[in-house]
Image (cartoon, helix red, strand yellow):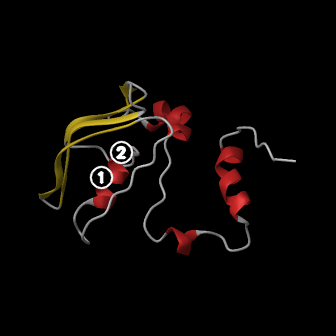
């Protein structure tokens, strides 16, 4: 069963389709990249997969359960299962933190253990 799955996903922005008919499946531990021209709907698709926008068509499922259409309260405990690194991420990373500290921060935010090699 895929960790993240989209079926027939579509989103309208400004009266036009930002994307339509998107099907994808991402297994646990996999990474996924998305490239395309400016204005092609990349960010809108990512935001929809993360549950920050609601699709006009289709559905998103997380670990086999509905993800799209849920209130934020129902999503909150499952948010640690999905993360995104958006374009221009280097400009948004705090320069005073090391790479290790940047990787540990989401674990701390979600109350997960941080293990360091000795």
Which residue is painted at 48% across and 35% down in the image?
Answer: 28
* Quarter occupied by residue 40: bottom left
Which residue is painted at 35% across and 45% down in the image?
Answer: 49
- Label 2 residue SS: helix
For the residue carrying disc 1, how many other residues have a C-alpha within 10 Å: few (<14), some (14-19), or many (20+)?
Answer: many
Asked if labels 2 and 1 touch by Cβ distance under 8 angstroms, the answer is: yes
Q: In the visual, does 85 lie left or right of 49?
A: right
Furthest toward the left, the residue is 16
Q: In the visual, does 89 lie left or right of 107?
A: left
Instruction: Identify residue for label 2.
Output: 49
| Position in image of residue 110 (x %, y %) | 65, 41
Q: In the visual, does 83 lie left or right of 55?
A: right
Instruction: Please say if 65 is above or below 24.
Output: above
| Position in image of residue 101 (x %, y %) | 73, 59
- Label 1 residue SS: helix
Which residue is painted at 45% across and 38% down in the image?
Answer: 72
Instruction: Please say if 65 is above or below 46.
Output: above
Q: For the residues marked 1 and 2, what is the alpha-carbon distance in whole angstroms?
A: 6 Å
| Position in image of residue 73 (x %, y %) | 49, 34
Which residue is painted at 45% across and 48% down in the image?
Answer: 31
- Looking at the figure, which quarter contains the N terminus? top left
Furthest toward the right, the residue is 118
| Position in image of residue 75 (x %, y %) | 47, 34
Instruction: Identify residue for label 1.
Output: 45
For the residue carrying disc 2, how many other residues have a C-alpha within 10 Å: few (<14), some (14-19), or many (20+)?
Answer: many
């Amino acid at each position: 069963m895929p960790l993240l799955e989209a079926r027939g996903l579509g989103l309208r922005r400004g009266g036009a389709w930002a994307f339509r008919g998107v099907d994808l499946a991402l297994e646990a531990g996999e990474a996924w990249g998305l490239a395309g021209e400016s204005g092609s709907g990349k960010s809108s698709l990512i935001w929809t997969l993360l549950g920050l926008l609601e699709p006009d068509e289709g559905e998103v499922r997380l670990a086999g359960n509905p993800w799209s259409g849920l209130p934020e309260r129902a999503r909150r405990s499952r948010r640690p299962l999905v993360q995104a690194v958006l374009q221009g991420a280097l400009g948004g990373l705090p320069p005073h933190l090391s790479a290790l500290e940047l990787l540990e921060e989401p674990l701390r935010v979600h109350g997960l253990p941080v293990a360091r090699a000795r």
